[in-house]
Amino acid sequence: MRSLEFKGRDIVSIEDFSREEINYILNISKSMEQLASQGSNMLKGKILATLFFEPSTRTRLSFEAAMLKLGGAAIGFAEAEVTSVRKGENLADTIRAVENYADVIALRHPLDGAAKLAAEFSKVPILNAGSGSEEHPTQALMDLYTIQKEKGRIDGLKIALVGDLRYGRTVHSLAYALSLYNIELYLISPESLKMRKEVIHSVEKKISVFEGTNLEDVIPQVDVLYVTRIQKERFPDAAEYAKVKGTYKVDLKLLKNAKTDMIILHPLPRVDEISAEVDSAPQARYFQQVRNGLVVRMALLALVLGAVK
Ligand code: CP
């Protein structure tokens, strides 16, 4: 595989990346497995700033852990209320301040378009760690890495995305990324939470897409079941959330009709859409998926900072 240039690049949308580039990132991620155990000084002297304007457990901590594993340092905030945003500072000014202290910035923000805006102002690479209900590209990369690692391939698979396909940002990035592979995509959601039209229009030009509401109908066919939480915090109306709350429940009864080698993924956090009894089922891979986030984010930091080619 030829070497590709990532130094200085922003990771704002997964749509900015070709299949060749994504495969390259997945290969570099694999090479990070050993460094995740042993540690490295590859990014010694480099600083990551994590600017999180929304709650996070996995994304922020895995970015920070990834930087520390590679010998760099991490600064940042997990709560905008303790920053000068509280005094009225806007995002562009925040970015133009932080770029003086850090070599790379991971940004999570409640508004669609925030990562794009930050990238327009920033002199250092912006890694979109989740922008509104729009995209979560680094999550999509770790999802692809997990599918590749667990199934040995991405091409040829039948993959179902289930749950909140309207407000869930991970499924938007993942659908765009999967459309670069030769897969069949099943989109299962309540009617009111169907996949955004612009995502469907882009994806169905490249791969076959089936939309439905009934999980039981597709479960016997799929190789990968990607379950998502209904994003309560993004509903403009509590009554609308109440109508769809608890629509899907993956439990052992449902899995009786699944392929034995199907895998279950979830970006996490979960609420009630996967029963705890499934955690010890042979298909459960969502905690391995969390671990894979570390190596993928190590790869991304090393690539955008030019430490690996
Ligand atoms: N998957 C994900 O983005 O998790 P966090 O919200 O905990 O970062």
Image: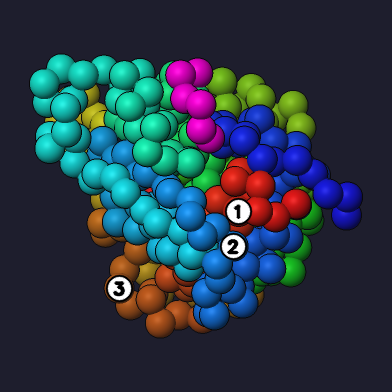
Is 175 above or below relative to 72? above
Q: Quarter of the image for the N terminus: give it.
A: bottom right
Q: Amino acid at mark 2?
A: Met
Alpha-carbon neighbours of circle 3 within 10 Å: few (<14), some, or many (≥20)?
few
Sequence-wise first label, 1 or 3: 3
Q: Is mark 3 within 8 Å of ligand 1?
A: no
Q: Amino acid at mark 1?
A: Ala
Q: Position of residue 149 (x, y in %)?
A: 66, 69
Q: CA distance from mark 1 to mark 3?
A: 36 Å
Overall secondary structure of the magenta section? loop
Q: Write down the residue under mark 2.
A: 42
Asked whether the residues under the numbered discs 2 and 3 touch, taking CB atoms below 8 Å apart as contact, a structural biologist would say: no
Which is more toward the observer, 198 or 97? 97
Asked whether the residues under the numbered discs 1 and 3 touch, taking CB atoms below 8 Å apart as contact, a structural biologist would say: no
Alpha-carbon neighbours of circle 2 within 10 Å: few (<14), some, or many (≥20)?
some
Question: Start and end of the magenta stretch?
Answer: 120-125
Q: Position of residue 245 (x, y in %)?
A: 24, 44
Q: Position of residue 186 (x, y in %)?
A: 60, 45
Left or right relative to 143: residue 177: right
Residue 276 has which mark?
3
